């Protein structure tokens, strides 16, 4: 397992290099000049040239990339074009917000998906199965931002159970943090729970028909032990891959849901950077998101190896 972790970490180096080259190249093709956005339409030509010189935009693309890469290797992702804030500081300040929202959403998706999938698999072709399948279809069809607005209208505005907007850090108040993250996490995790429920149901139906499950039942083992110790453990092997993909989807979806609930996470930072064409901020955010996705994939490989010994590297 250690060999697998080392291989994945080594593969991260060329991946980040390729992503940095593509991101740097694509951001250079943006139609508007950041200097125009900073100065405005009433700026003089001298001011325009001074800003371009200060931002390093007068240099050719390759020297600019080499200079940026040298600083990035030392942990310096540059400075925002618009507020002189260090990109690494801005990202690290917003990162815990997005990660906590994604983590709670993944937990909700996993719990709801497992419960619905197991209930449907234990009674195939029953009303429970049909209801779970119908709910999974609806869950995957509803956009998370629309569902978030519906949750705010019902549980925040009408019932006043949860705050409509904002985010409270866990360190400030665990209870207020839970209240502030509940609605966006439910809105974000709905579609993922539906996808997990479908996979759990399919995997469990196949496992419950295996000979070793029949043998376990014939030995007099309790129904709960057969389901949760023997059947569910083997059914989780393909579910891990689905969960890994859904976590990456949640990371991307969090950027949109944060706008609905006015949460200052990476989503707000990314959208602001794109609107302003803040090139250093965009490049830093892309690299951080790639690292997060690779970490999720690495954790998936490790968990998959524990559940399925055949998948472990020799």
Image: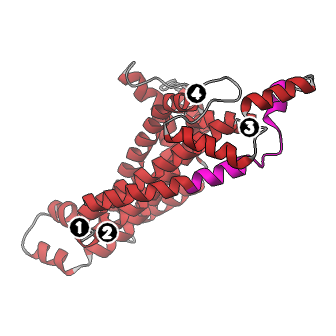
Disc number lying in front (4 or 2): 4
Disc 2 to disc 1, how far (Cα)?
Answer: 7 Å
* Labels 4 and 2: the sequence-earlier one: 4
Q: Secondary structure at mark 3?
A: loop
Disc 1 to disc 4, how far (Cα)?
Answer: 51 Å
In the image, 219 versus 8, the foreground residue is: 8
The location of residue 291, given as percent across then percent down, is: 47, 48
Q: Residue at x 12, y 63 (%)?
A: 222
Q: Secondary structure at mark 2?
A: helix
Q: In the visual, does 139 lie left or right of 36?
A: left
Please name the residue that numbered disc 2 is placed on. Answer: 204
Please name the residue that numbered disc 3 is placed on. Answer: 277
Q: In the visual, does 158 lie left or right of 212?
A: right
Q: Residue at x 41, y 40 (%)?
A: 104
Q: Which residues are magenta?
A: 18-39
Q: Secondary structure at mark 1?
A: helix
Please name the residue that numbered disc 4 is placed on. Answer: 86
Q: Quadrant of residue 259?
A: top right
């Amino acid at each position: 397992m250690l060999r697998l972790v080392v291989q994945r970490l080594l593969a991260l180096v060329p991946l980040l290099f390729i992503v940095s080259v593509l991101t740097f190249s694509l951001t250079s093709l943006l139609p508007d000049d950041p200097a125009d956005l900073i100065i405005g339409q009433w700026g003089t030509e001298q001011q325009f040239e001074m800003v371009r010189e200060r931002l390093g935009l007068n240099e050719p693309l390759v020297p600019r990339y080499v200079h940026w890469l040298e600083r990035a290797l030392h942990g310096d992702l540059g400075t925002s074009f618009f507020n002189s804030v260090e990109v690494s500081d801005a990202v690290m300040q917003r990162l815990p917000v997005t990660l906590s929202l994604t983590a709670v959403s993944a937990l909700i998706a996993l719990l709801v998906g497992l419960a619905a999938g197991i209930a449907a698999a234990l009674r195939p072709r029953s009303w429970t199965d049909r209801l779970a399948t119908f709910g999974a279809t609806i869950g995957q069809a509803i956009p998370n931002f629309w569902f978030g607005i519906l949750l705010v209208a019902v549980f925040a505005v009408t019932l006043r159970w949860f705050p409509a907007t904002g985010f409270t850090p866990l360190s400030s108040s665990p209870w207020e943090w839970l209240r502030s993250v509940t609605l966006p996490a439910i809105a974000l995790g709905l579609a993922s729970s539906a996808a997990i429920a479908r996979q759990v149901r399919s995997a469990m139906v196949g496992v419950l028909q295996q000979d070793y499950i029949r043998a376990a039942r014939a030995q007099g083992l309790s129904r709960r032990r057969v389901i949760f110790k023997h059947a569910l453990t083997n059914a989780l092997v393909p579910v891990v891959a689905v969960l890994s993909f859904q976590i990456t989807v949640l990371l991307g979806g969090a950027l949109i849901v944060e706008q609905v609930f006015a949460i200052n996470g990476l989503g707000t930072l990314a959208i602001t950077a794109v609107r302003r064409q803040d090139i250093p901020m965009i490049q830093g955010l892309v690299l951080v998101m790639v690292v997060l996705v690779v970490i999720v994939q690495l954790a998936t490989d490790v968990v998959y190896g524990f559940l399925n010994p055949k998948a472990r590297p020799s």
